Amino acid sequence: MSVALLGLGILAGCSSGESGSSVATTASRSAASATDVAFAQSMIPHHEQAVEMADMALTADSSASEDVQRLAEQIQAAQGPEIQQMTGWLESWGTPTTMPGATDADGMQGMDHSGHDMGGVMVAGMMTAEQMQQLEQASGEQFDDMWLTMMIAHHQGAIAMAQQAQASSNPEVAALADAIVTAQREEIQVMQELLTEDSP
């Protein structure tokens, strides 16, 4: 299977925009709303798991296809800087960089929190520890199919969270939310095409 991912790589790579430190400085000029804080606190572990899944695809044990490996590299390149960016925001706002132990009623109101349990907080689209273990043990075509299926669901969760922050009054938060929605929709399309090519 072969899919041209270069254009997508450029899109994903640009999604983080400025460096984490400079963007954090700009974002700190506006007061952080509860939604902004919850968005960053939720998206950081969400991105971290995506990077972990990308790492799995790039190990020799996975025997992942070249297309999956390219996509994994793009996810690493885009989401690593975004993690730094959001961490910088939270530090500049004087708020914890990790999620609280329970869902904040004043946080991402209306968000679908179905997903991975992070100490009482359900993060949309995240894989369970059992699912991650199953993925780590897979290889070859089985790994590709599992990875693509899981990453599609993971991206759908990220989009649902980012959409809640698109209306943020903080322009930097809104811009990152827009970038996540755009880039991950494009990646979902690529992954769906790869799954279709793998189907008998």
Image (spheres, rainbow, N blue to C red):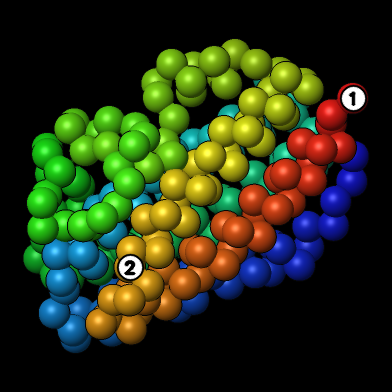
Q: Residue at 78% across / 22% down in the picture?
A: 141
Q: Residue at 40% across / 61% down in the picture?
A: 162
In the figure, residue 164 lies in which quadrant? bottom left
Specify whether residue 13 is in view.
no
Instruction: Identify the residue at the far front of this view.
Output: 110
Choose between 73 and 106: the one closer to the eye. 106
Q: Residue at 65% across / 16% down in the picture?
A: 138
- Position of the N terminus, as image quadrant, is top right
Choose between 21 and 183: the one closer to the eye. 183
In the rendered image, the vertical position of residue 20 relative to residue 153, given as above or below: below
Q: Which residue is mark 1?
A: 200
Query: Which is more N-terminal, label 1 or label 2?
Result: 2
Q: Which residue is mark 2?
A: 165
Residue type, numbered disc 1: Pro
The image position of residue 125, as x and y in percent, is 43, 40
Residue type, numbered disc 2: Ala
In the rendered image, the vertical position of residue 159 relative to residue 57, given as above or below: below
In the figure, residue 85 lies in which quadrant? bottom left
Left/right placement of residue 140 relative to residue 134 reads: right
In the rendered image, the vertical position of residue 79 relative to residue 55, given as above or below: below
